[in-house]
Image (spheres, rainbow, N blue to C red):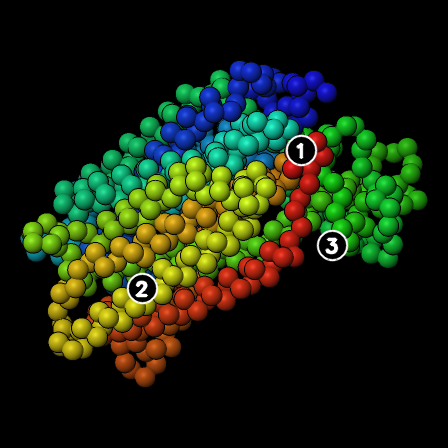
């Protein structure tokens, strides 16, 4: 097979739609533009979202629990809309055009949010004591802007990481080795943007103005679009393969129609086109038949009515590759579900970690300098920036010597390590809040706004979560890309993001349930507006228990998982 033909089979083309020239496109030469785009876009996103709970409380005058739920709901939506963007990319536009079009929506939303925080009449009115009031119309403008941003990010999130990985060829040993490293540096670029957001932009929002605090991220998003567009001529673009939802429905319908058909033991008795490694799905290689989930194999059993000269009816007879697509998705779902609890733990950095920090002494020792609780998320970012090169340059080579695997750890081993590490962040949070509440009770600090306990005691859980991210989130990025069928990679990336969304929603649901149950007898409950009267440590303990149970389930599922195998791919 000619070297260039590899890209024809994979459906990889250049920006004009012609066959990609291997020597002129892709690999690391295309990645700086993609990584620059992601760094700027994440700066915009985190610059706007990191301190959003404080904006809701101070500017929109919302209660703590209400503000936390609104942030969680909006954050969850930002991770559900990728299903829309992924479907459009995989079925119709491809990843490149999807990123460009949805970026425009994103910029419009950022611009509107900036106007809602800076233009008189659109922004909330505040008295000299900084007590603010927002009308229903002003709140509406703010939330319209936020949900436009949620829609815009939905077309970017599921496509950018997959688009970057598309620049490396699975059939080329040298390029495939670089692909795993790409995911590490992709996440590194995310956190460089987040570092600027959590430090500089939070400071701008709290000390200069919210208008500037939202305006700078809007400019960053415009830079992200320019960076991405600048690399157009260097990109390898995967052809869209048509609606993945339709193909999966065809397999289900065909299987149901043949529910009484016996699946042959010999896989050669199943239907598949015979042209090299190319499948009938545009831009997708064939998938090898796998054991298990044999009910779906019925869709590929050739019956008497399928032997005629008429074209194959895909609602009666499907290829092995098409059947293996739905098998791959079904196998991913249990592993996917274990990411929900981890995301719930992660979401506390933008919710109750911040509200807990509000009750602590936020002065730098022996100075008048004050630290915003939201700024502490910078330590999560620093942790990621520290651990990514450590993992890529030290842990992987050491693990490779023991395991013999090219990437050191399998993707599931990497994810499980992160889940285990995350447990300790919640254990620490439980202990810290317990110590803080004991101080409140011992000295009767119930009405004291800031307990004389340094906010810097909150740093360790941020750093631990950052370490866990490098293992779990990057492991998920690679896992969902590698285990996805070629024509469904954006969709599977969106699944990974959907787990994060459900984690946000689960956080909101837990807050609602805990608040309702613990206030039934008329007491303040675990999560009152004044945390000195509550038991936030019990809430963190609940998350600790859920994390331990989740880790145990993950270990069991990992032992049962069957990896996907593509024809013509190096394993």
Outermost residue on the bottom side: it is 521
Q: CA distance from mark 2 to mark 3?
A: 42 Å
Mark earlier in primary sequence (2, 3): 3
Residue at figure coordinates x 50%, y 67% from the top left: 549
The quarter of the rendered structure image containing the C terminus is top right
Q: Which residue is depicted at the point 17% across and 60% down?
A: 454
- Taking the image as shown, residue 47 lies to the left or right of residue 290, namely left
Q: Which residue is mark 2?
A: 429
Q: Secondary structure at mark 3?
A: loop
* Disc with the residue nearer the chain's start (1 vs 2): 2
Residue contact at pointers 2 and 3, CB within 8 angstroms: no
How far is disc 3 from disc 1 in space, using C-alphas?
23 Å
Q: Which is in the foreground here, disc 3 or disc 1?
A: 1
Q: CA distance from mark 1 to mark 2?
A: 45 Å
Residue appearing at x 23%, y 59% in the figure: 457
Query: Residue 17: image x %, image y %?
Result: 59, 19
Residue 285 at what x, y percent from top left? 69, 33
The mark found on residue 569 in the picture is 1
For disc 3, the marked residue is 293
Q: Is residue 15 visible?
A: no
Q: Nearer the viewer, residue 392 or 25?
A: 392
């Amino acid at each position: 097979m000619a070297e260039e033909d590899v890209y024809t089979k994979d459906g990889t083309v250049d920006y004009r739609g012609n066959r990609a020239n291997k020597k002129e496109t892709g690999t690391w030469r295309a990645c700086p533009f993609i990584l620059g785009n992601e760094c700027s876009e994440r700066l915009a996103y985190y610059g706007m979202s990191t301190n959003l709970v404080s904006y809701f409380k101070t500017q929109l005058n919302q209660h703590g629990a209400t503000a936390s739920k609104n942030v969680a709901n909006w954050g969850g939506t930002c991770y559900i809309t990728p299903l829309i963007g992924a479907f459009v990319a995989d079925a119709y536009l491809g990843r490149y055009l999807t990123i460009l079009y949805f970026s425009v929506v994103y910029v419009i939303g950022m611009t509107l949010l900036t106007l809602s925080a800076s233009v008189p009449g659109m922004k909330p009115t505040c008295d000299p004591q900084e007590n603010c009031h927002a009308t229903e119309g002003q709140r509406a403008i703010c939330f319209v802007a936020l949900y436009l941003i949620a829609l815009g990010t939905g077309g970017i999130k599921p496509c950018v990481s997959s688009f970057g990985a598309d620049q490396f060829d699975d059939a080329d040993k040298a390029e495939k080795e670089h692909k795993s490293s790409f995911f590490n540096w992709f996440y590194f670029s995310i956190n460089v943007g987040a570092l600027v957001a959590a430090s500089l932009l939070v400071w701008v929002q709290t000390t200069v103005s919210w208008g500037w605090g939202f305006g700078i991220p809007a400019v960053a998003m415009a830079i992200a679009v320019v960076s991405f567009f600048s690399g157009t001529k260097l990109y390898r673009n995967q052809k869209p393969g048509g609606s993945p939802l339709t193909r999966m429905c065809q397999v289900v319908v065909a299987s149901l129609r043949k529910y009484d058909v016996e699946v042959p033991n010999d896989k050669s008795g199943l239907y598949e086109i015979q042209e090299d490694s190319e499948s009938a799905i545009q831009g997708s290689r064939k998938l090898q038949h796998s054991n298990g989930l044999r009910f779906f194999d019925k869709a590929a059993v050739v019956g008497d009515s399928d032997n005629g000269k008429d074209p194959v009816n895909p609602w009666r007879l499907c290829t092995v590759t098409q059947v293996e697509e739905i098998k791959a998705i079904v196998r991913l779902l249990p592993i996917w579900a274990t990411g929900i609890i981890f995301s719930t733990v992660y979401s506390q950095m933008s919710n109750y970690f911040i509200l807990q920090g509000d009750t602590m002494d936020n002065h730098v020792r022996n100075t008048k300098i004050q630290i915003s609780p939201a700024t502490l998320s910078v330590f999560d970012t620093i942790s990621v920036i520290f651990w990514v090169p450590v993992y890529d340059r030290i842990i992987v080579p050491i693990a490779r010597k023991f395991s013999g695997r090219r990437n050191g750890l399998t993707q599931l081993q990497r994810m499980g390590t992160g889940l285990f590490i995350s447990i300790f962040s919640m254990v620490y949070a439980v202990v810290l809040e317990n110590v803080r509440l004991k101080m409140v009770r011992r000295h009767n600090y119930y009405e004291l706004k800031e307990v004389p306990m340094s906010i810097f005691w909150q740093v360790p859980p941020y750093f631990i979560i950052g370490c866990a991210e490098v293992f779990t989130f990057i492991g998920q990025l690679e896992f969902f890309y590698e285990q996805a069928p070629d024509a469904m990679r954006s969709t599977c990336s969106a699944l990974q993001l959907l787990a994060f969304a459900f984690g946000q929603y689960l956080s909101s649901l837990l807050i609602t349930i805990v608040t309702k149950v613990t206030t039934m007898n008329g007491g303040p409950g675990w999560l009152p507006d004044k945390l000195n009267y509550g038991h936030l440590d019990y809430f963190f303990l609940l998350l600790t228990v859920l994390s331990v149970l989740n880790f145990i389930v993950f270990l069991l599922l990992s032992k049962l998982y069957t990896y996907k195998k593509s024809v013509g791919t190096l394993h």
